[in-house]
Image (tube, rainbow, N blue to C red):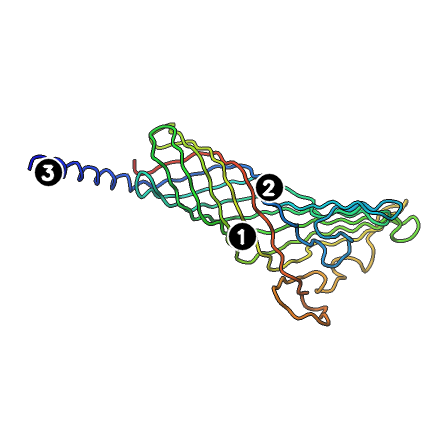
Amino acid sequence: MKKACLLLSTAVFALASAKSYAQEFYIRGGGGYSIENASTEFNNADPNGLTMIRQSTDITVNPDGSANIKSLNGTLGSGFKGNLTVGYMFNQYIGAELGFNYFTGEEKTIGKLNSPLMRSEAKAYLEGLDIMPAIFLTPGFAKLNPYARMGLLIPAAGKLHIDSQAYAPNGGGEGVDINVKAKTEVESRFSVGFAGALGVSYPISPKFQIFGEVEMKSLSIKSKSAEIKEYETTAITPQGTSLVPGMQLADMPRNETHFEFEDTYTEGAEDPTKARKIPTQYVNASGLGFNFGVRYSFGK
């Protein structure tokens, strides 16, 4: 009987301890950097064909008419990020958390052309806010404590920015060079990816911990629509630079400035007052990187 009471007391104490620990909420904040991961073809940055850039290529046209072609496959997942996460530990080993990650990507060349008639380049970068619901797992060591977290990555806000430029020597006649600059923004549809991390934390006080982790994200963002926000054509002569009449953003019909991405659609005569439908594209935002920061625990 005494042994049974002792065992019961021990079990009650363990349950009480687990219940007390289960009340731990925490906030984690930090920042980091990601590099590219899982390369794919870049988007078509010029549906109007004004820059003569072929999708995801770097082309150099030689004087003899031959061309050197280089693939520009990659991702737009490299860049800097900051994160703020709220979490709850069910017990010493497992918890659930909801993270908010802000990402500003590095500008990448996604298309390039160098020929006697034209020199063009398109660059792109991502910026946005992702939401990450995740599971947190750890052995619960007192000092240097390893952990893993894994969950979904859901873009909540943000855009793909594309900056294009095309320069045509003597494009307006002998001694008149033409320069075109455009800025495009691409909106996304609802998309879901995956992210996971392996890291370690170390306590610097009863409530504060510092952490470092390696994170992998796999995310392909489906495009919804695109709009050319800025478009400028200038003529360059020895006397100076001037805007070319009739070749500015205000002069372009809607079907050359607004685009809608569709999986299936019927192609026919275009209505210049409506957005042009083009095939669906995906933005590869996958990356591999690291995060550092601090964690503050409540309830201990």
Mark-to-mark CA distance, 2 and 3: 59 Å
Seen from the viewer's position, the closer of residues 207 and 116 is: 116
* Depicted 262 relative to depicted 93: above or below: below
Under mark 2, the amino acid is Glu
Please, what secondary structure does the residue beneath circle 3 have?
helix
* Depicted 300 relative to depicted 155: above or below: above
Between discs 1 and 2, the one toward the N terminus: 2
Residue 137 lies left or right of residue 161; in this view the side is left
Q: Quadrant of the N terminus?
A: top left
Say whether marks 1 and 2 touch (CB < 8 Å): no
Q: Residue at x 7, y 35 (%)?
A: 2
Foreground mark, 1 or 2, reads 2
Q: Residue at x 38, y 43 (%)?
A: 87
Residue 237 lies, in percent from the top left, at 89, 47
Residue found at the very far left of the displayed protein: 1
Residue wearing tag 1: 157
Please, what secondary structure does the residue beneath circle 2 have?
strand
Residue 282 lies left or right of residue 135; in this view the side is right
Seen from the viewer's position, the closer of residues 38 and 111 is: 38
Under mark 1, the amino acid is Ala
